[in-house]
């Protein structure tokens, strides 16, 4: 059975975004995907091989509210609705104690992880209200709960994402919109293995394993799940 709902994935051309896009496209969803790196965009298009009837792909800075609003409007105009929103934009920077954390690093982590999620959520809610089963999934991090040393800016930004998701789920409790946040530990991607060459990655969750969880959270069957902070740690 095909599902022709419209799914917006910000930062959707990375490892997790590509895995999730493949799953949603296979179900018949139409996809509106943002990227910032042209090389990722090209690889994404090759991996999915979708036509314009099923894919809208645009370069968008999710930390810029005007760009996000324009993208959501274009999505609605192209496909007629917005039913699913997955905020996948994010990034990690560590190796600095709080007293050594520069303003640039602090602001970068907030913009990349928290501001992007906030703008994505805020601009999408008016569109999602028209959906029979509006679904939002944000991406937090285990670090928001475990708060490892040397990466306070990242920890705080991801903790903000958790608070944002929980706040939104309460505000939208009387609507058909659910909001949840998944909490990866370390995702097993080539880039992560390169950054952590001596780590034991055997039990790290893969992008597709996390995508399976998100696939359920954005399904109509997940209507009773909202405000969830869902660990996807693998077996680490």
Image (spheres, rainbow, N blue to C red):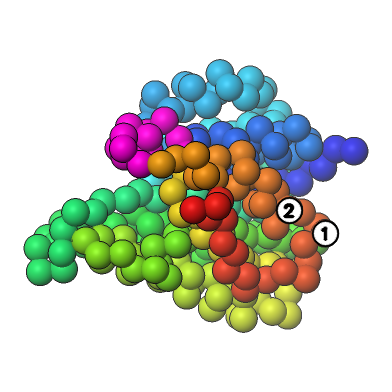
**The N terminus lies in quadrant:** top right
How many marks are shown on the rendered structure? 2
Q: Is residue 23 left or right of residue 73?
A: right
Q: Nearer the viewer, residue 106 or 82?
A: 106
With respect to residue 182, does 210 lie above or below?
above
Question: CB atoms at circles 1 and 2 under 8 Å apart?
Answer: yes
| Numbered circle sitting on residue 216 | 2
Q: Nearer the viewer, residue 62 or 228?
A: 228
User: Are there few (<14), some (14-19), or many (20+) residues within 10 Å of tag 1?
Assistant: few
With respect to residue 53, does 17 lie above or below?
below
For label 1, the SS is helix
Q: Where is mark 1, residue-wise?
A: 221
Is residue 198 highlighted in magenta?
yes
- The image shows residue 226 at horizontal and vertical percentages of 67, 71
Instruction: Tell me if residue 117 can be seen.
Output: no
Q: Nearer the viewer, residue 214 or 52?
A: 214
| Numbered circle sitting on residue 96 | none
Q: Which residues are magenta?
A: 188-199
Question: Which one is earlier in the sequence, the residue at label 1 or at label 2?
Answer: 2
């Amino acid at each position: 059975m095909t599902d022709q709902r419209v799914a917006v994935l910000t930062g959707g051309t990375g490892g997790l975004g590509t895995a999730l896009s493949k799953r949603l496209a296979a179900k018949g969803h139409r996809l509106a995907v943002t990227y910032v790196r042209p090389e990722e965009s090209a690889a994404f298009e090759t991996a999915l091989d979708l036509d314009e009837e099923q894919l809208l792909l645009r370069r968008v800075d999710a930390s810029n509210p005007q760009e996000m609003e324009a993208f959501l409007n274009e999505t609605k105009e192209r496909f007629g609705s917005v039913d699913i929103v997955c905020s996948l934009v994010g990034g990690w920077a560590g190796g600095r104690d709080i007293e050594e954390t520069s303003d640039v690093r602090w602001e970068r982590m907030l913009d990349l992880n928290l501001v992007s999620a906030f703008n994505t959520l805020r601009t999408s809610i008016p569109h999602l209200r028209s959906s029979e089963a509006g679904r939002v999934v944000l991406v937090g991090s285990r670090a928001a709960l475990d708060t490892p040393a040397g990466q306070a800016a990242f920890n705080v930004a991801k903790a903000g994402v958790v608070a944002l998701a929980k706040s939104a789920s309460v505000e939208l409790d009387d609507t058909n919109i659910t909001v949840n946040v998944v909490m990866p530990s370390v995702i097993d991607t080539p880039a992560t293995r390169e950054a952590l060459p001596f780590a034991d990655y055997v039990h790290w969750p893969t992008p597709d394993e996390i995508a399976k969880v998100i696939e359920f959270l954005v399904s109509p069957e997940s209507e009773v799940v909202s405000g969830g902070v869902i660990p996807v740690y693998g077996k680490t």
